[in-house]
């Protein structure tokens, strides 16, 4: 691929400078690619209605063509023409959770190019809760297709340096708008069938959804225990969020986790490996290793969500051979944290 000159533009995340937004919007209108912050992770955006523009997203990321993209909008009226129908439940969900980290799956129209949906008859749409993202969509006057702005397979980017590391020279512009808030991707919810089904756990939890819906299920493939089940969300079948190092997750009560992590650390070190420990505020003082990174506070799991991808990338920088990561409880946002950690570890849980 021919090297591009990537313009890096700093924009205020709370009060975006409109002249700068217009410069970025011009690139989108002309079929270019712009990485921008959202409240979940950084996205790599292009005009969702132009096939060639969307193609350059897949190229820059090295993303498999059958892994569909999420279309980002800034107002509910933009749904018109993009989706076949808006189910009643969608109105309730949009009212409660948009703008926010909830992606809804709708039946699509032909206006959406096949390349976005990997040929599926549905399309994923969300309204991000971030002023830069919203203004960029508004000033482009276009729906913007945007997957996470990382090299396919790597941890998603939660600040502009992650994007620069992965995509500099491959896209037209990177907007630096500071660190993202949630730190994990949106929840993907399929409302095209009878029972709303979570295809990917994310920023909005099942507990949140159940405050407005009578019933919500998880797609069976999310648990990754039965590999015969084909996930309804094509992206869930790929290797994901992977640091360079191997990773194992240690699960159990906190005493057990500390004990097992300490033992494992010794075993790996005896094999001559450089070991990293992904610890929490409550546990890090119990370990003696040189490469301990604190991912967050067990009492405030949203701090772990916000830091997880950054910590995985930090372990790559210090070049550990193996990461021993402490599991968190799989409730609330913990469900999404563990989903990403299990994928990063290729399912290896002790
Ligand atoms: P990313 O944008 O990198 O966070 O990935 C988008 C996620 O949304 C992937 O896991 C996709 O498989 C999923 N997705 C996008 N469109 C659809 C769709 N029409 N049906 C099911 N899943 C989808
Ligand atoms: Mg992604």
Image (cartoon, rainbow, N blue to C red):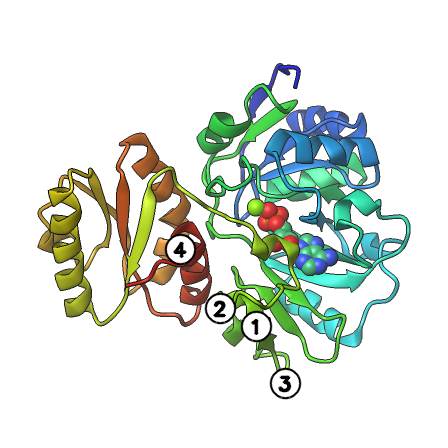
Work out which residue is located at the far bottom of the displayed protein and give it. 214
Q: Quadrant of residue 135?
A: top right
Residue at image location 45% in from the left, 54% down from the top: 343
Residue at image location 64% in from the left, 80% down from the top: 213
Q: Name the residue under label 2.
A: 223
Placement of the C terminus among the 4 image quadrants: bottom left
What is the distance, in whole Å, between disc 2 and disc 4 at their CAs?
12 Å
Q: Earlier in the sequence, mark 1 or mark 3?
A: 3
Visible residue check, residue 310: yes
Tell me, for residue 220, which label it has, or none: 1
Of labels 1 and 3, the one closer to you: 1
22 on left or right of 202: right
Front residue of 12/51: it is 51
Q: Mark 4 points at which residue?
A: 341
What is the distance, in whole Å, between disc 3 and disc 2 at their CAs?
22 Å
Q: Earlier in the sequence, mark 3 or mark 2?
A: 3
Query: Is the CB of the residue bearing disc 3 within 8 angstroms of ligand 1?
Result: no
């Amino acid at each position: 691929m021919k090297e591009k000159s990537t313009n890096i533009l700093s924009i205020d995340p709370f009060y975006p400078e409109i002249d700068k937004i217009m410069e970025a919007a011009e690139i989108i209108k002309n079929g270019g690619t712009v990485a921008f912050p959202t409240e979940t992770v950084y996205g790599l955006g292009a005009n969702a209605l132009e096939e060639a523009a969307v193609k350059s997203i897949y190229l820059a990321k090295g993303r498999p063509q059958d892994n569909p993209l999420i279309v980002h909008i800034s107002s509910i009226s933009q749904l018109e023409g993009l989706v076949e129908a808006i189910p009643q439940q969608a109105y309730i969900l949009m009212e409660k959770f948009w703008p926010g980290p909830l992606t809804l799956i709708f039946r699509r129209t032909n206006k959406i190019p096949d390349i976005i949906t990997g040929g599926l008859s549905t399309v994923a749409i969300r309204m991000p809760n971030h002023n830069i993202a919203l203004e960029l969509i508004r000033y482009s006057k276009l729906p913007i297709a945007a997957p996470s702005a990382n090299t396919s397979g790597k941890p998603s980017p939660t600040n502009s340096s992650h994007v620069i590391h992965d995509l500099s020279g491959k896209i037209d512009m990177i907007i630096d708008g500071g660190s993202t808030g949630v730190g994990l991707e949106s929840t993907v919810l399929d409302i095209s069938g009878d029972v709303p089904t979570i295809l990917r756990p994310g920023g909005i939890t099942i507990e949140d959804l159940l405050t407005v819906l009578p019933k919500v299920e998880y797609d069976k493939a999310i648990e990754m225990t039965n590999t015969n089940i084909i996930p309804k969300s094509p992206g869930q079948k790929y290797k994901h969020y992977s640091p360079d190092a191997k990773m194992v997750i240690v699960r159990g009560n906190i005493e057990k986790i500390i004990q097992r992590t300490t033992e494992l650390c010794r075993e790996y070190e005896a094999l001559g490996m450089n070991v990293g420990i992904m610890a929490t505020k409550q546990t890090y003082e119990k370990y003696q290793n040189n490469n301990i990174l604190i991912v967050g506070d067990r009492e405030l799991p949203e701090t772990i969500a916000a830091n997880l991808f950054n910590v995985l990338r930090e372990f790559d920088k210090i070049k550990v051979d193996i990461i021993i990561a402490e599991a968190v409880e799989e409730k609330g946002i913990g469900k999404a944290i563990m989903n990403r950690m299990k994928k990063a570890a290729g399912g290896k849980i002790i």
